[in-house]
Image (cartoon, helix red, strand yellow):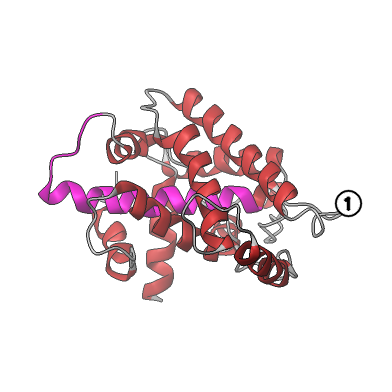
Amino acid sequence: MEDITVFKQNFKNILVYGCETLENENEVLFSCLAKGYRDMTSARTTFKGIGEIFEEKEKSFKKDKNNVNGEKTYRESFYKKLAEIITKKMLSKNFDNKDFFDKAHNKTCNEIINLFHKEFSQLYVKPREFYYGSAQKLVNMTLKYFLLAAEDYKKENKVKTNSMYFNVLSSEPFLHCPIDSIIINKMNEQREKSKGKIDSTWSTKKEEEYLTLQEEIQKYVGDNESKLNYDFKVWKRKKLN
């Protein structure tokens, strides 16, 4: 198995957690999620119009006198809802096998899809919808960044059993590879011609196709390696080219 340490270090060198320390897991998760959200919304065509709705919701949020949760902005309030889903479904649990992790990952993505449809109902009017491909990017990037933060924290601190850091470190063998155009392009290079090319539009992927791509990535890295390692290797080589 190829040593993945150098590939991870590439991301740690550029990752800014937005926190003074890594002590507060909730603050770190919030920062990782915000970065994951920016990565997800890089698909500008898919998310066209969401910025304007955010602005309108911010105005209403500031006028709302019933906000008692301490959030200063609508964005902060919305990110907290996303963080609560990921925490409850994934980071509050210590997964001991791939099947349990995959089921929790699936529930997380679908709950996030439902949240986007609820919060931005005026945007996601059929046939337009918030797709599984977008949800997976948010979930997978957030977990990826949070894993790196946990690894950094572990270097100088004892990680408490059943903490979020402990749980994401324990889940590393099961973590998924975030699907985006860079990953898809690399998969197309490795793919057998008989299978045809994968459409590089990741943000509108349906659940079934996403799961098929994860299975294919597992074959590329081997049964004993995390699918997330495929992401580290592909992006590291892209940075070096």
Q: Is residue 218 left or right of residue 123?
A: left
User: For the point 27% across and 36% down, which residue is it?
Assistant: 166
Number of numbered discs visible in the structure rendering: 1
Q: Residue 10, located in which quarter of the rendered image? A: bottom left
Q: Residue at x 65, y 50 (%)?
A: 133
Residue extending furthest front? 65
Q: Residue furthest right?
A: 127
Q: Nearer the viewer, residue 42 or 235?
A: 42
Badge 1 marks a residue whose secondary structure is: loop
On the image, the x and y values in percent for residue 145 come to 38, 55
Q: Residue furthest left?
A: 156
Can see residue 192? no
x and y percentages locating residue 23 in the rendered image: 22, 51
Dominant secondary structure, magenta: helix
Q: Is residue 51 left or right of residue 223?
A: right
Q: In which quadrant of the rendered image does the N terminus lie?
A: top left
Image location (x, y in percent) of residue 163: 28, 35
Instruction: Report the residue marked by disc 1.
Output: 126
Decide: is 225 above or below 52.
above
Residue 146: within the magenta? yes
Is residue 131 positioned above or below 106 on the image?
Answer: below
The answer to whether residue 114 is seen in the rendering is yes
Q: Residues within 10 Å of mark 1 (few under 14, many from 20)?
A: few
User: Which amino acid is tagged 1?
Assistant: Lys
Q: Give the vertical position of 185 relative to 168 (above or below).
A: below
Residue occupying image coordinates x 48% and y 61%: 34
Hey, which quadrant is residue 174 in on the image?
top left
Q: Which region of the structure is painted magenta?
A: 134-161
Can you give x and y, in whole percent of width and height, for residue 88 in the image? 47, 34
